[in-house]
Image: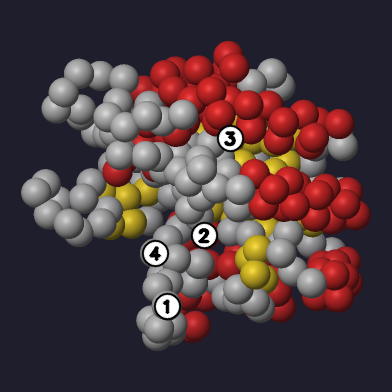
Amino acid sequence: MILTGFTDEAGQSLATQIKATKDLGWNHLSARSIDGQNIHDLSEADFQNSVAQLNEAGIQVIEFGSLIGSWSKPIESNFAVTIGEIERAIPRMQQLGTKLIRIMSYAQKPWGEDQQEAERFRRLREIVQRFSDAGIDALHENCMNWGGFSAQHTLRLIEEVPGLKLIYDTGNPVFQRDRSKPQPYPWQDPLEFYQTIQAHVAHVHIKDCLHPPEGSDEPERYTFAGEGLARISETLKALQANGYTGAYAIEPHIATVFHATEGETINEEQCYNSYVEYGRAFEQTLTQSCTE
């Protein structure tokens, strides 16, 4: 069983990310950003320097956490941007021997507006095919994108996009309404979401959180795995019962660098310590779920 994580939440520099991985006793990391740049947006010199550091440390990159079709990109965005990200990602993944890349289905438009599903499906077909031709699996994550509207929306992507596989993120259903159900659109049930899509899950992201307070503009609040509403323990048991043999990638969001707002002061020591503490705590949770 492989344990990994989005190490940019431990620190911006790759040296810090490698140190956090080694402190946890892990041999893999999930690459998202290095020094504030997504790995597919680094200069070639910076990327090659990163490769040298990873090789020297004996750390493998198990997945690219790309920005392809992400929640930050509307479906009206220029598709040439996506193509450029793909063309930069493929040779870098091949050089690192990385077989998994996280993609999404572009940002959700306000519910009730035209979601332009046909264009989303068209784009994802091309994205998945380009990666497949290069021997890489493009995995869709249930985030704040079209596929994240509900488990049924995710299954529709599977129907419409040949070869698409899934990342299941345990925490993302907690703060999203289930748009497959009638008004007033209940919060998604994480375990129900997983059970609905489980046949197509190839990778798992671990996060946990609490609902945004009703009637407020406050965001969801992130917690250690098992302390929120993501039904982590039940989901881990269900994964094992279903014969899941893939990796678990922590994405804590507890004291995160990646989601810091511009101008926000970052306590680097707190970010590092919280990431490592989260990883150790999750190991215990996973071990316990395996033995119960």
Q: Quadrant of residue 186?
A: top left
Q: Which mark is nearer the camera, 2 or 3?
A: 3
* Secondary structure category for the residue under label 1: loop
What amino acid type is highlighted by mark number 2?
A: Arg
Whichever of labels 1 and 3 marks the residue nearer the N terminus, that label is: 3
Whichever of labels 3 and 4 marks the residue nearer the N terminus, that label is: 3
Label 3 to label 4, Cα distance in Å?
23 Å
Residue 227 locus on image (x, y percent): 30, 50
* Secondary structure category for the residue under label 3: strand
Whether tag 2 and tag 3 are in contact, CB under 8 A, the answer is no
Q: Which mark is on residue 200?
A: none
- Mark 4 nearby-residue class (10 Å; few <14, some 14–19, many ≥20): some
From what the image shows, is residue 124 above or below residue 72?
above
Label 2 to label 4, Cα distance in Å?
14 Å
Label 4 to label 1, Cα distance in Å?
17 Å
Residue 124 locus on image (x, y percent): 64, 31
The residue wearing badge 2 is: 280
Q: Which mark is on residue 140?
A: 3
Whichever of labels 2 and 4 marks the residue nearer the N terminus, that label is: 4
Quadrant placement of the C terminus: top left
Residue 144 locus on image (x, y percent): 41, 43
What amino acid type is highlighted by mark number 4?
A: Ile
The residue wearing badge 4 is: 254
The residue wearing badge 1 is: 262
Residue drawn at 56 percent across, 40 percent down: 104
Whether tag 3 and tag 4 are in contact, CB under 8 A, the answer is no
Label 2 to label 3, Cα distance in Å?
27 Å
- How many numbered discs sit on the rendered protein? 4
